[in-house]
């Protein structure tokens, strides 16, 4: 008896859902579609090899690191990039999201990684050439005891097979280069 009641209930819910869905479709507004600004993100997709140079202390040689990046699209609105490599001999993973906000008329995104507890939140714009995306954020500077500082990062498309990510952090009141990562698309 219990099984029959459950089966009948499921049938009613399923049938009502189909009828309601057909009615609601006619009333529902059209789903948004990616805009031309979202199209820019497509060139970031794919598998990439990376070579990074990080300045850990002003005046000292940069630390070098190799790794990889996998970038996927979510619905044409967002990209999610997973970076893997090593930092100071330890495994490192970082994840960046990037999208475009029509409301803000800016690119927006986030960065989190396995070396810190901070989540960096980005807003930025493309330059007139359409090749350089500049992202601004604020967060804790490890070289200044966690003091909240401004950060400016750029993502430059050099060619379909080469992109460069660079990061500057506010130190002593000025934006100071901290890191450059060259990405080469895997074939």
Image: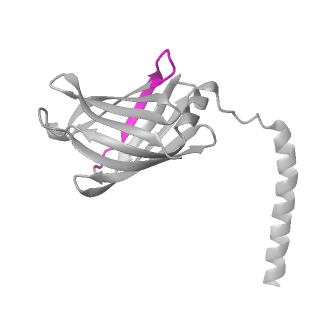
Q: Residue at x 12, y 37 (%)?
A: 60
Q: Is residue 156 left or right of residue 160?
A: left
The percent coordinates of residue 79 (x first, y second) are: 53, 41
Relative to 95, say whether 120 is above or below. Answer: above
Relative to 144, say whether 6 is above or below. Answer: below
Q: Residue at x 50, y 45 (%)?
A: 80
- The answer to whether one can see residue 114 in this image is no
Along the line of sight, the residue nearer the viewer: 38 or 87: 87
In magenta, the rendered stretch is 116-132
In this view, which residue lies farthest toward the left?
59
Relative to 54, say whether 86 is above or below. Answer: below
Q: Is residue 66 left or right of residue 163?
A: left
Query: Does 121 appear in magenta?
Result: yes
Along the line of sight, the residue nearer the viewer: 53 or 14: 53
Relative to 154, say whether 18 is above or below. Answer: below
The percent coordinates of residue 5 (x first, y second) are: 82, 77
Query: Does 31 appear in magenta?
Result: no
The percent coordinates of residue 62 (x first, y second) are: 20, 39
Residue 119 occupies quadrant: top left
- The answer to whether one can see residue 100 in this image is yes
In this view, which residue lies farthest toward the front?
187
């Amino acid at each position: 008896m219990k099984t029959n009641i459950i089966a009948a209930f499921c049938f009613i819910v399923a049938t009502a859902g189909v009828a309601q869905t057909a009615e609601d479709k006619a009333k529902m507004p059209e789903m948004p579609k990616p805009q031309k600004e979202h199209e820019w993100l497509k060139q970031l997709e794919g598998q990439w090899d990376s070579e990074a140079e990080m300045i850990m202390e002003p005046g000292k040689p940069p630390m070098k690191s190799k790794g990889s990046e996998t970038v996927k699209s979510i619905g044409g609105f967002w990209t999610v990039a997973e970076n893997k490599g090593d930092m100071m001999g330890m495994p490192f993973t970082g994840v960046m999201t990037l999208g475009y906000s029509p409301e803000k008329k800016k690119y927006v995104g986030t960065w989190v990684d396995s070396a810190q507890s901070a989540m960096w939140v980005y807003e930025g714009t493309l330059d007139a050439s359409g090749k350089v995306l500049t992202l601004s954020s604020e967060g804790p500077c490890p070289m200044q005891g966690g003091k909240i500082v401004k950060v400016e990062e750029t993502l430059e498309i050099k060619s379909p097979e080469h992109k460069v990510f660079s990061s500057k952090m506010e130190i002593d009141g000025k934006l100071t280069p901290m890191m450059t990562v060259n990405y080469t698309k895997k074939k």
